[in-house]
Amino acid sequence: MTEPAARKRRSLATVFRSERYSAISLLGAAILGLALANSVAGPGLIALMNQHIVIPGTTFDLSVEHWITDGLLAIFFFIIAVELRHELTRGELNTFSRALAPAVGAVAGVAVPATVYLLIAGPEFARGWPIPVATDIAFALGLIALVGRGLPASIRVFLLALAVIDDLIAILLIAVLFAKGFDPIALVAAIGSIAIFMGVGCLRATRPSTRALRTFVLIVLALSAWSAMVSSGIHATIAGVALGLVLRPKLAEKAAHALLPTVNAAVLPLFAFASSLVILPSGGVSALGPVFFAIAIALPLGKIVGITLAGWAFGRVARKMGASAGVRGADLVTVSAVAGIGFTVSLLMNQLAFADDPALQDQGVLGVLAGSAVSIVIGGVLVAIRARRARANSRG
């Protein structure tokens, strides 16, 4: 590869790793998917997503959509797991006192949106309660990068910590609530592959040829763990989480860094595009049901109310105890508004919760998009105002 070509490749990788690009590409892909679904190309694209792809010599027979959600999205969850472990061991959550404030906010930011959803949707559609509980880390941080120039670092740090804990809760919900046709033998095989993966990752490799061989073996073991997890009945993204948690930290962070451009440039936009291929109801808003309204309201309202009230109450207690109270006041409201951007994980939850009912799944997608859009507007305005005040104070 020539030097100019190498520089161009490095510059593209830098762009694809940026939080701003991630947010823009996710939103653009979702809008494009929704627009094309309601054009003359819509029926053909939806049929394409339902087309099955079979791997010869295996039992894998998944639709294109499921290859994206069960396959490619596992790479995204691998990166999430690497970031989670970094924050828990060397980052903003590495001590109990530092983790307590965002943990309290995250738990409330899960409980209140779920409660709001249940109150609006009712018992008939109760299985959709996990949909509005998630926060999209990539989109939330991307929004701050887009409009938050000069924003105090404490706000970004608190949001990152809260979102990481939020996603940990979401991962546990996926593992517990959405297991189907459980196969214990396949699960044992997946655990065995993950254990060997961890052992190989601990081996030191000094020569380029040895490192290449180790990488090849790790890829084979990762695919083995993923395929066994699919067969076990537990959602395949859990394999990505497990692999990210057990791989040696230095090697895991290097792998995540290498994979991030591909995830931001292809995996997440493709998932957002496929998930947004929904035909809008001909009757307009009046044709939408309780699932749409429950999600669209629970995401922005539930997050703002839950995180703000929990953060305020915890802050009062923490100050009396002399502990860290996290962010407060307007900063806390700003974080809670941005946390209402569900997007990637909420769309996945929606697919899992209403997998047997395409009509409800479509309403759920529209609810996630609407609720996230409201959170983007409210959160974006609050971030911009807070950042402008911070810049004025710094000049001042």
Image: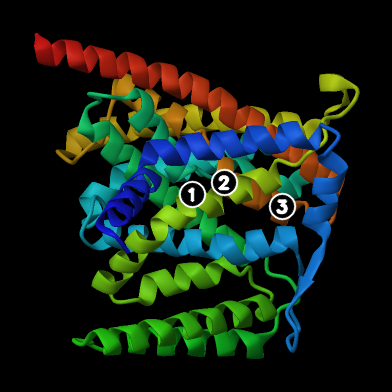
- Gap in Å between the C-alphas at discs 2 and 3? 16 Å
Residue 146 occupies quadrant: top left
Write the residue at 90% across / 22% down. Answer: 283
Work out which residue is located at the far right of the displayed protein and give it.
283
In the image, 151: left or right of 12? Answer: left
- Gap in Å between the C-alphas at discs 2 and 1? 7 Å
Instruction: Give the camera-side residue of 321 and 360.
Output: 360
Residue under circle 1?
Answer: 265
Residue under circle 3?
Answer: 351
Identify the image quadrant of the C terminus.
Answer: top left
Write the residue at 44% across / 30% down. Answer: 338
- Gap in Å between the C-alphas at discs 3 and 1? 22 Å
Residue under circle 2?
Answer: 269
Mark toward the start of the polypeptide (2 vs 3)? 2
Write the residue at 29% across / 84% down. Answer: 211
Residue 130 seen in render: no
Residue 204 occupies quadrant: bottom left
Write the residue at 27% across / 40% down. Answer: 157
Q: For the residues labelled 2 and 1, say whether their Cβ atoms are less than 8 Å apart.
A: yes
Q: Where is residue 160 in the image (x, y as percent from the top left)?
A: 34, 43
* Tag 3: amino acid: Gln
Instruction: Give the camera-side residue of 118 and 181.
Output: 181
Mark toward the start of the polypeptide (3 vs 1)? 1
